[in-house]
Image (cartoon, rainbow, N blue to C red):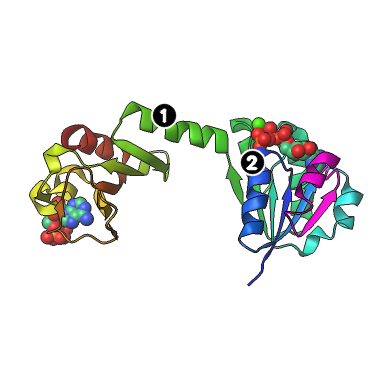
Amino acid sequence: MKREFAVIGLGRFGGSICRELSEEGMDVLAIDADEDKIDEFKDIAAHAVIADTTDDKVLKELGIRNIEHVIVAIGDNIQASILTTIMLKELGIKTLTVKAQNDYHEKVLKKIGADYVVHPERDMGRRIAHSIISTNILDHLELSDDHSIVEVKAGKRMDGKTLVDLDIRAQYGCNIVAIKEADEKGINVSPMATQTIEADDILIVIGADKDISRFEKQLV
Ligand code: ATP
Ligand code: ATP
Ligand code: CA
């Protein structure tokens, strides 16, 4: 089923959303105030239009009202991002995803009714920081201020042991939700308590940050 999306602002972030949605066969309306950007995307997106979305009249003429999900990826111009978001909200767009430039911008966007606020530079920075701190943490997804899902590589201390042997849930308060075998043989998405872990297997762990950290220091 084709669903309709609009992406406003075709910088690196908005541009990459637009490309990916289009490659997935979605019907995308790409909008940017810059003619060069529209030239670049006219063969990628289903529709590509030059428009300044801070202009109320222009926005209405785009027929954006009927689009289900609009992504606002205007970056540096925070005022334009806020104004565009307010007007889209007033037009009754069902789902609005907006890129925030900083924490203050994020707060304002939430206040004016953006459904999803994304902060790609900050979030990617955090993920990379976590994987730099520990060579065993391969990836990190923040669930809330103090809970996460992480991907860790099992160390020698876990080699040949089962989840019961290690008693992970009881000892560390974390759950192993999946185990990827080292040689990519497969992924087990609901490991049994009796499953044996081998060094270099990749464990997907969910839990409170403090518990994950304890688990990682003592076992990984
Ligand atoms: P990147 O994702 O590359 O980091 P960025 O966050 O730095 O991008 P900008 O380059 O500031 O974002 O803006 C992204 C795009 O939004 C630009 O191509 C710009 O032309 C477009 N843009 C800015 N203001 C408007 C506006 N009022 N209406 C439509 N498009 C706009
Ligand atoms: P619990 O008392 O923790 O609910 P249980 O009754 O479910 O355990 P088992 O499923 O046999 O018992 O698991 C025994 C122990 O093995 C658990 O207490 C836990 O410490 C550990 N364990 C089993 N599965 C997992 C898992 N997916 N992630 C983390 N630890 C696990
Ligand atoms: Ca930028």
Q: Ligand 3 lies in which image quarter?
A: top right
Q: Which image quarter: residue 95?
A: bottom right
Report whether 122 appears left or right of 89. Answer: left
Residue 64: give x, y in percent of width and height. 80, 58
Question: Which stretch did the figure color magenta?
Answer: 32-53
Q: Amino acid at mark 1?
A: Ala
> Within the magenta stretch, is there residue 34?
yes
Pick the residue in front: 109 or 99. Answer: 99
Badge 2 residue CB within 8 Å of ligand 1: yes
Q: Is residue 12 above or below residue 65?
A: above
Q: Quadrant of the C terminus?
A: top left
Residue at 36%, 43% (x, y): give it. 147
Q: Which image quarter: residue 190?
A: bottom left
Question: Which residue, as the protein is rendered here, is positioned at the far top?
Answer: 133
Q: Amino acid at mark 2?
A: Phe
Residue 13: which numbered mark, if any? 2
Q: Quadrant of the N terminus?
A: bottom right
Q: 10 Å neighbourhood of mark 1: few (<14), some, or many (≥20)?
A: few
| Kind of element beneath mark 1 | helix
Badge 1 residue CB within 8 Å of ligand 3: no
Task: State how far apart marks 2 and 1 are (Cα).
Answer: 20 Å
Q: Is residue 34 visible?
A: no
Give the residue pinned by disc 1: 129
Q: Is residue 130 above or below residue 110?
A: above
Report whether 125 appears left or right of 16. Answer: left
Residue at 79%, 42% (x, y): give it. 37
Q: Is residue 96 above or below residue 68?
A: above
